[in-house]
Image (cartoon, helix red, strand yellow):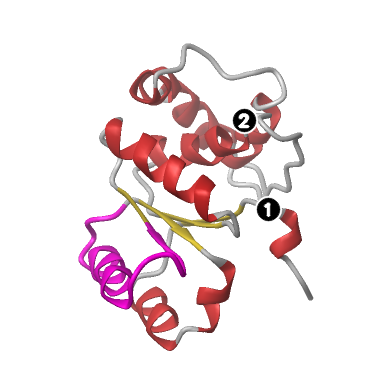
Amino acid sequence: MRDETLAKERWEKVPAALSKLGYKELRDAQIPCVDRLFGGEDTFCILPTSGGKTLIGLMPTLVNEWRTVIFSPLIALMKDQVDGLCKKRVRAGMLNSNQSDTENWQELKDWDDGLTQVLYVAPERIANPQFRNVMRQNPPDFVIVDEAHVMSK
């Protein structure tokens, strides 16, 4: 059920979050999705490539100071996103097959220690016992599936 009071409080924090990320405003297509999330509603958002889906997920993350896991199969996009977020002083990391086991373990440890706010995860990591254990101990506040083709029954 939508919480109008909560949504209003969250919208008041949007200018600061946008500024932190280097944006002036949301695009028209982003507003209804962000509004649903701010009102506490589960949201399924479909936008074209470069339509601003990442920003939709980052708004509730930054406004609420949440810890967010983003499932994405695109390793190059993960790296670009993580690099960009870190430059904007958002604590971000990633788990994928291009990193060593040691690097992935450090990313999990950073999440477990509360040092990571946004964690990009390759979908196959769901089968990893260490990943599942860390997520059980310190579950994300928000989960995003960034590419619809990573979903199945």
Question: What is the residue that sits farthest to the bottom in this orientation?
Answer: 129
Residue located beneath label 1 in the image: 147
Secondary structure of the residue carrying numbered label 2? loop
Q: Where are the magenta residues, as a range?
A: 94-116
All told, the count of numbered labels is 2
Residue located beneath label 2 in the image: 52
Question: Is residue 77 left or right of 68 when viewed as pictured?
Answer: right
For the C terminus, the quadrant is: bottom right
Corner quadrant of residue 106: bottom left
Was residue 149 drawn as part of the magenta stretch in this picture? no
Neighbor class of circle 1 (other Cα within 10 Å; few <14, some 14-19, many 20+) is some
- Residue lying at 54% horizontally and 41% vertically, measured from the top left: 57
Question: Is residue 91 left or right of 1 when viewed as pictured?
Answer: left
- Residue lying at 38% horizontally and 53% vertically, measured from the top left: 67
Q: Amino acid at mark 1?
A: Glu
Was residue 96 drawn as part of the magenta stretch in this picture? yes
